[in-house]
Amino acid sequence: MAAAQDSFDIILTVNGVPVSRRVEARQHLTDFLREELGLTGSHLGCEHGACGACTVRVNGEIVRGCLMLALQADGACVETIEGLSESGAIADLQRAFHERNALQCGFCTPGMLVAAAELLERRPGATREEIRTHMAGNYCRCTGYQSIVDAVEAACRERARQRA
């Protein structure tokens, strides 16, 4: 019987930058981003995919980084909160979160922003109910969600004004 391979070489793009590394077979994507690349914006909360603190984009889709192995991202394009922030893609969302006090301790905020960005790209005219439904996979223990929904709705309205 052949021995299982413990580590693999991967090549991926993270926030527009090509990255190649050798990773352990069982290393989760969030651990890889944090430990290997120093991108600490994605947080580990529950490590079961329930809280959403580890939310990142892989090939344009939001995923739970604690449920995806780094090895599975081989060949993929990964975007983290750092990349979305530095590009200015979510500046309006960040401003709305700040203005509406939709962040308290900040632990859930990166995952919330990544999830909200996806919603606003896919449903630019999202209703409050659609916002609530989409954001339901991201837990916040501080704000009570009302201010988060207010912030996402405000960014949605602002983007609609800019399109008009």
Image: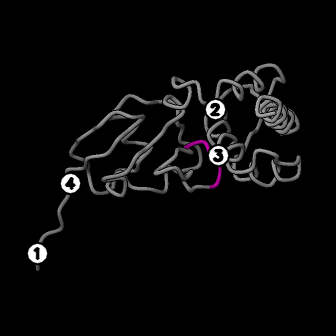
Q: Earlier in the sequence, mark 1 or mark 4?
A: 1
Task: Decide which of 15, 159 is in the foreground and name it.
Answer: 159
Question: Disc 2 designates what residue?
Answer: 107
Category of crowding for the residue at label 3, using alpha-carbon neighbours closer than 10 angstroms: few (below 14), some (14–19), many (at least 20):
some
- Give the Cα distance between marks 3 and 1: 43 Å
Nearest to viewer (mark 1 / mark 4): 4
Tell me: 29 left or right of 1: right
From this viewpoint, which residue is outermost toward the left?
2
Three-letter amino acid code of the residue under disc 4: Phe
Q: Is residue 144 visible?
A: no
Q: Quadrant of residue 144?
A: top right
Which color scheme is applied?
Answer: one colour
Q: CA distance from mark 2 to mark 4?
A: 31 Å
- The residue indicated by pointer 1 is 2
The circle on residue 18 is: none
Give the residue displayed 41% in from the left and 48% down from the top: 29
Q: Residue at x 66, y 40 (%)?
A: 117
Residue at image position (13%, 70%) is 3
x, y percent for residue 2: 11, 75
**Which quadrant of the view contains residue 37?**
top left
Q: Overall secondary structure of the magenta stretch?
A: loop
Task: Measure how far apart labels 4 and 3 are at the Cα level.
Answer: 31 Å
Q: Does label 4 or label 3 sit earlier along the sequence?
A: 4
Q: Which residues are magenta?
A: 50-54
> In the image, what residue type sits under mark 3?
Glu
Say which element carries label 1.
loop
Comparing marks 2 and 4, which lies closer to the viewer? Answer: 4
Residue type beneath disc 2: Phe
Say which label, 2 or 4, has the lower sequence index: 4
